[in-house]
Image (cartoon, helix red, strand yellow):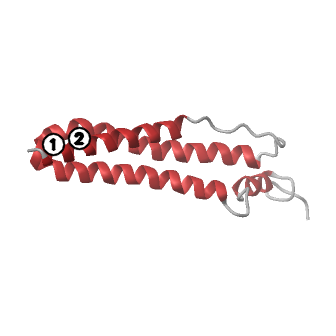
Amino acid sequence: MTDGPSGPGGAGAHREQAERPFDVGLQPERTALAWSRTGLVFLVGALLAARLLLEVVGTWVLIPVAPVVLIAIGVSVAGSRRYRDQHRRLTSGAGDRIALPDGALPALVSALTAVCGIASLAVVLHLALR
């Protein structure tokens, strides 16, 4: 039997290598799931805040909620893209030195968390003093 495209060394073998997990502990996969959960939490939190504050603030609540929803979707997409890029680098066999992703996504999530926390505190204080 001859080695075809899916035999040893063919395109099928390369595809199998690229699809297999890099780490037995699945650390990159767990990290990708964590980014997805983070985006989902921001999305649910923004929609819940909109639902609860709609009676108090009215439709003005959509002004701060809309960007948070868009950023939450962006965090999920960026986390998925980050995983694909890192998985491709790790399974390519390029060597021992792999470039790490930048810190823009964690910085964005930290800033968004701080802004949402400050906004929540402002709403609670406003409702308490009313």
Q: Is residue 8 left or right of residue 76?
A: right
Question: Residue 34's spot in the image, x, y percent?
Answer: 52, 55
Rate crowding at label 2 as few (under 14), some (14 to 19) or many (20 or more) other CA atoms within 10 Å.
few
Query: Are circles 1 and 2 on residues that touch, CB within 8 Å?
Result: yes
Q: Is residue 65 left or right of residue 9?
A: left
Q: Secondary structure at mark 2?
A: helix
The tag on residue 122 is 2
The quadrant of the image that shows the N terminus is bottom right
Q: CA distance from mark 1 to mark 2?
A: 6 Å
In this view, the residue in front, 1 or 8, is 8
Q: Is residue 109 left or right of residue 21?
A: left
The tag on residue 5 is none
Q: Residue at x 11, y 42 (%)?
A: 58
Question: Residue 37's spot in the image, x, y percent?
Answer: 46, 56
Question: Residue 64's spot in the image, x, y percent?
Answer: 26, 37
Give, as a three-letter code, the residue at label 2.
Ala
Asked whether the viewer can see residue 49, the reply is yes
Q: Is residue 4 left or right of residue 39?
A: right
Give, as a three-letter code, the residue at label 1.
His
- The quadrant in which residue 59 appears is top left
In this view, the residue in front, 34 or 1, is 34
The tag on residue 126 is 1
The quadrant of the image that shows the C terminus is top left
Q: Secondary structure at mark 1?
A: helix
